[in-house]
Image: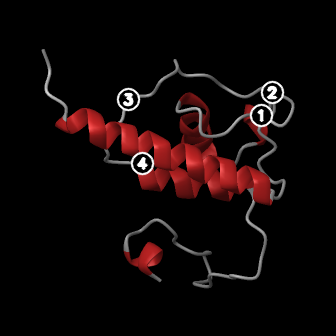
Amino acid sequence: MAAASLGIIQGYPDGTFRPGRQVSRAELATILHRVILGRDVSPPAPPATFADIETIPAWALDAAQAARQYALMQGRDGRNFVPSAEATRAEAAVTLMRTALLLASASISSVMPTR
């Protein structure tokens, strides 16, 4: 429950966490967005939107756009986010690795001397 105490995972409106349930792509993006919020990381790409932006729930919209901008998540066919689709294990593994690399590069650059 450390992630909950840090505000990274907030659960559902009814107060449950449902650990046995698959995570949607919108939920995965939201979790990753909360991990990078407040960190000194610069987005590697200009802001971009998904073709199916109108299907992304309001609570996940900023997170989905940040996931694309920070190159953490891509569209299923390169253009569509498909927010309600279940995140596959492969997608979760890749996005977690990309997030870790993003945070590691930010940590390294923050301690490197500038010339």
Q: Give the class, few, some or many, for how many residues have Cα within 10 Å of label 2's Cα (few <14, many ≥20).
A: few
Mark identifier at residue 36: 4
Judging depth in this view, the residue of 2 and 30 nearest the camera is 2
Q: Are marks 3 and 2 in contact (CB under 8 Å)?
A: no
Mark identifier at residue 6: none
The residue under label 2 is which amino acid type?
Gly
Q: Which residue sits furthest top?
A: 115
From mark 1 to mark 4, how far is it between C-alphas?
20 Å
Q: Give the class, few, some or many, for how many residues have Cα within 10 Å of label 4's Cα (few <14, many ≥20).
A: some
Figure quadrant of residue 42 = top left
Q: Which residue is mark 1?
A: 75
Where does the image place residue 27, in percent across and percent down from the top left? 66, 58
Residue 43 seen in the current view? yes
First along the sequence among labels 2 and 4: 4
Residue 115 appears left or right of 29: left
Q: Which residue is mark 2?
A: 78
Question: Looking at the image, how many numbered discs can be counted on the residues?
Answer: 4
Residue 44 appears left or right of 73: left
From mark 2 to mark 1, how far is it between C-alphas?
4 Å
Which residue is at 68% across, 82% downward? 19
Q: Give the class, few, some or many, for how many residues have Cα within 10 Å of label 1's Cα (few <14, many ≥20).
A: some
Q: Are marks 1 and 4 in contact (CB under 8 Å)?
A: no
Q: Give the class, few, some or many, for how many residues have Cα within 10 Å of label 3's Cα (few <14, many ≥20).
A: few
Q: Which residue is mark 3?
A: 42
Where does the image place residue 58, in percent across and percent down from the top left? 62, 47
The residue under label 4 is which amino acid type?
Ile
From mark 3 to mark 4, how far is it between C-alphas?
10 Å
The residue under label 3 is which amino acid type?
Ser
First along the sequence among labels 3 and 2: 3
